[in-house]
Image (spheres, rainbow, N blue to C red):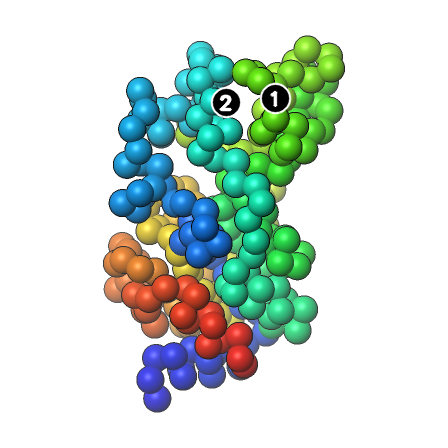
């Protein structure tokens, strides 16, 4: 049996699948990732992107932060791809118990997934840092300079910046889902960003599947490894 047939068989036999995904899940919807040749880390700004999207830079220079954020990190108007749709279908069928994602674009929910643990937050949630009032992403996108609430406070996206900790509740629920999974599919992530990447270590089963264009530090621990595009793999898994 070839690797893809093995994976199809595992999916059929599973009812507690956990999918752990990174930027590569959304690149096929047209959203650029951070580390590819034309990704954020290779574009020219006055500061490296990881500096601009750090908590200390946001505090020090919010106007520059929001200029970069609007231009490069506010992916609105994109649609879910075959991977998002396939995962939503598995959840509806009772096969998938959770999606754990490093992405902040909300595309899993747009595809219909209900149980999504967003480790790094979401651009779709924005709150006034003074009064807590909620604002949609469009408000931030269309604001000039620093987005301000009617009370005068800064409206900050609910995304985890560098130097900020992950949300404890989201992390705890992710760990619980991963521990109980009978199949874990890790896809579209280089598994180099911690603490998120370390969550893979909580998987207790023997069906760990890695799908990523490039090698990852966890390839040797996986039971199945695909260095392919997610669209190709999930295009065939969607037929199950």
Q: Is residue 202 visible?
A: no
Q: Residue at x 36, y 64 (%)?
A: 229
Residue beneath the point at 47% across and 22% down: 67
Q: Confirm whether residue 14 shows in the render.
A: yes
From what the image shows, is residue 65 above or below residue 29?
above
Looking at marks 2 and 1 on the same chain, the residue that comes earlier in the sequence is marked by 2
Q: Could you tell me which quadrant the C terminus lies in?
A: bottom right
Q: Position of residue 147 (x, y in %)?
A: 61, 19
Q: Give the residue pinned by disc 1.
A: 143
Q: Nearer the viewer, residue 34 or 9?
A: 34
Residue 69 vertical placement versus 97 (above, below): above
Total count of labels: 2
Q: Where is the N terminus found, in terms of image quarters?
A: bottom left
Residue found at x 34% / y 41%:
39
> How far across and down, in percent of the image, does residue 127 sit?
66, 26
Residue position for label 2: 66
Q: Are marks 2 and 1 in contact (CB under 8 Å)?
A: yes
Residue 158 % position (x, y): 58, 32
Name which quarter of the figure residue 202 lies in. Answer: bottom left
């Amino acid at each position: 049996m070839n690797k893809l047939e093995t994976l199809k068989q595992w999916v059929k036999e599973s009812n507690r699948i956990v999918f752990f995904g990174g930027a590569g899940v959304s690149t096929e919807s047209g959203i650029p990732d951070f580390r590819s040749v034309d990704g954020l880390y290779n574009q020219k700004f006055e500061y490296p992107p990881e500096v601009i999207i750090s908590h200390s830079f946001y505090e020090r220079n919010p106007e520059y932060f929001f200029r970069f954020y609007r231009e490069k990190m506010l992916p609105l108007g994109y649609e879910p791809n075959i991977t998002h749709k396939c995962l939503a279908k598995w959840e509806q069928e009772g096969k998938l118990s959770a999606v754990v994602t490093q992405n902040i674009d909300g595309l899993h929910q747009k595809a219909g997934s209900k149980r999504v643990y967003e480790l790094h937050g979401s651009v779709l949630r924005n709150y006034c840092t003074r009064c807590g009032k909620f604002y949609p992403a469009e408000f931030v996108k269309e604001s000039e300079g620093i987005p301000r609430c009617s009370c005068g406070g800064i409206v900050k996206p609910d995304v985890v910046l560098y130097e900020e900790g992950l949300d404890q509740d989201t992390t705890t629920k992710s760990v619980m889902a991963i521990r109980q999974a009978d199949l874990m599919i890790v896809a579209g992530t280089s598994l180099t960003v911690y603490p998120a990447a370390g969550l893979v270590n909580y998987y207790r089963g023997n069906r760990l599947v890695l799908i990523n264009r490039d090698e990852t530090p966890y390839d040797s621990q996986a039971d199945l490894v695909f260095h392919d595009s997610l669209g190709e793999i999930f295009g065939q898994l969607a037929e199950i």
